[in-house]
Amino acid sequence: DVSFEKLGDARLPSSAGVFVDHYPLLIAGRAPSKHRENLRLSSPYSGKSLGSFEQAEEEDVERALSNATRSFQQEMKRMPAYKRADILYRLARLVEEQHEVFAQRIALEGGKPLRDSRLEVSRAVNTIKMSGDEALQLNGETITMDRAPGSENCLAYTIRMPVGPVLAISAFNHPLNLICHQVCTAFAAGNTVIVKPASQTPLSCFALIELFYEAGASEEAISLVAVPGARAEQLVKDARIRFLNFIGGEDVGWELRRGVAPGVRVALEHGGTGTAIIAQDGDLERAVPALTRASFYHAGQVCVSTQRIFVHESQYEAAKSRFAKAASELQVGDPSDPDTEVGPLIRKEEVERVHRLVQSAADVGAEVLCGGKALERQCYAPTVLANTNGNMEVVSREVFGPVVALQSFRELEAVYEELNESPYSFQTALYTDNIDTAHAAARKIETRALLLNESTAFRVDWMPFGGGKRSGLGVGGTRHAVHEMSEERLVVVRVEGL
């Protein structure tokens, strides 16, 4: 086991333990201040103190913005791709060396079960490596110019250039890998980054940025700024920010988009009502384990968590009993226990909110097959509801908790129509062995990704990933994110005598 190690106000070197007592802002050249507020952090499961995190003041935000602008103009725009890649490859090795330390940190600060925290660290290492690969493959293209008279003596090609300082605002549920997707891809494209981690889980981000410096990135190129929501507007509205990358709640994200300066690019990753469909020929033996995992992974606190399952009427009763049995057998509790499968919700208020949604559905006819109650230490029992419909909030709105709703159907076309009326569009799962059904669904369902015989929560870090409608804007995934945070520049050369 990795023990707690008290290091006072010192930064967290690569040889340290899981947590320190106090975490300063990571802003190069910041002036010392005795008046900065400190956010006290505690574990969502145990309530144990994890230290305090320094909050940025107005002058700290200005310093981070100035650093990002200066470093972009004087350093990052001129840094060759191989140097950016070398830094990212070194960072991947440093994170790999601290694999178990990061895993325990994730479990304790965010409540994600240790088995899943370990998986997140492995994914993060791969995300960093692939970001380095993409830095080396940021290529343009040659444009054919002799398609019409008058341009046949021209040569044309494109190059990809970084967009400028990036503001990355992240979420609590993947406190390491999401940061890597936002920061490492921005750095790979040649940008500077100001990162604002989630206030509930900033510690993994702090450790990662420290290792970024150790790997060779300058302290001006990457800043960590912890600010309350009201002060975040100072960052969002500043015209020096050229790209806003936000992961979090839809209401906040769309409001932030309205506040950015003209010309600023925006990427938003929100959530939705992750829906799976089990067709008449769908294999329950395959679907139930995968969708149970997708529904209750990290206590349902995942943007593509399976929340709603349509089951053909011929399989509905069998599906009810199988899902209820699978959910009731999950081990709920201490996230630091390697056997735990479902940990706590991030805040006590979230437990109360989820229970209200479940209770309101039950009050209008939903059947609670299992769960439906709060447990100790901010845990909520994995809950399976049956006889649900689209008028229930537990179906129509994102739950972001360990709850899945089952609904019977007769005709697939009716399911497609109901899904397309939703304000959300992210990833949809379809279980069928009929190729015609699969191809038809891919065209008829308004979804950004259709997963055939796989759950809504499936993701590999290099695939295009993002929501549509209210679920988001832009495309993530290592290569796609690097391209989003760079811009194509056209060069046209007139050459006589061609």
Image (tube, rainbow, N blue to C red):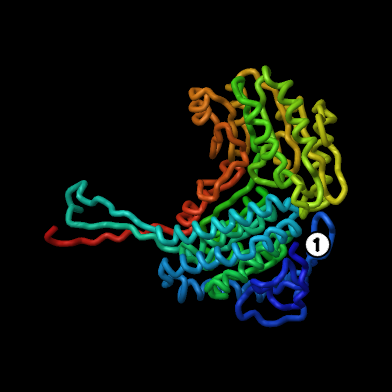
Query: Which quadrant of the figure has residue 459?
Result: top right
Residue at image x 85%, y 51%? 377
Residue 239 visible in the shown view: no
Q: Is residue 38 left or right of residue 254?
A: right
Residue type at mark 1? Ser
Q: Where is 385 relative to 167, above or below?
A: above
The number of numbered badges drawn on the structure is: 1
Q: Is residue 132 left or right of residue 203?
A: left
Query: Which quadrant of the figure has residue 260?
Result: bottom right
Residue at image x 62%, y 28%? 277
- Label 1: few (<14), some (14–19) or many (≥20) C-alpha neighbours in 10 Å: some
Q: Nearer the viewer, residue 188 or 129?
A: 129
Residue at far left of view: 497
Q: Which residue is mark 1?
A: 42
Q: Nearer the viewer, residue 68 or 332?
A: 332
Residue at far right of view: 376
Residue 289 visible in the shown view: yes
Query: Which quadrant of the figure has residue 77?
Result: bottom left
Residue at far front of view: 1
Q: Quadrant of the N terminus?
A: bottom right
The location of residue 409, given as percent across then percent down, is 66, 21
Q: Nearer the viewer, residue 187 or 471?
A: 187
Q: Is residue 412 left or right of residue 263?
A: right
Q: Is residue 275 left or right of residue 21?
A: left
The location of residue 13, given as percent across then percent down, is 66, 74
The location of residue 361, given as percent across then percent down, is 80, 32
Residue at image x 57%, y 75%? 219
Instruction: Give the SS element for disc 1.
Output: strand
The location of residue 365, given as percent across then percent down, is 82, 26
Q: Quadrant of the C terminus?
A: bottom left
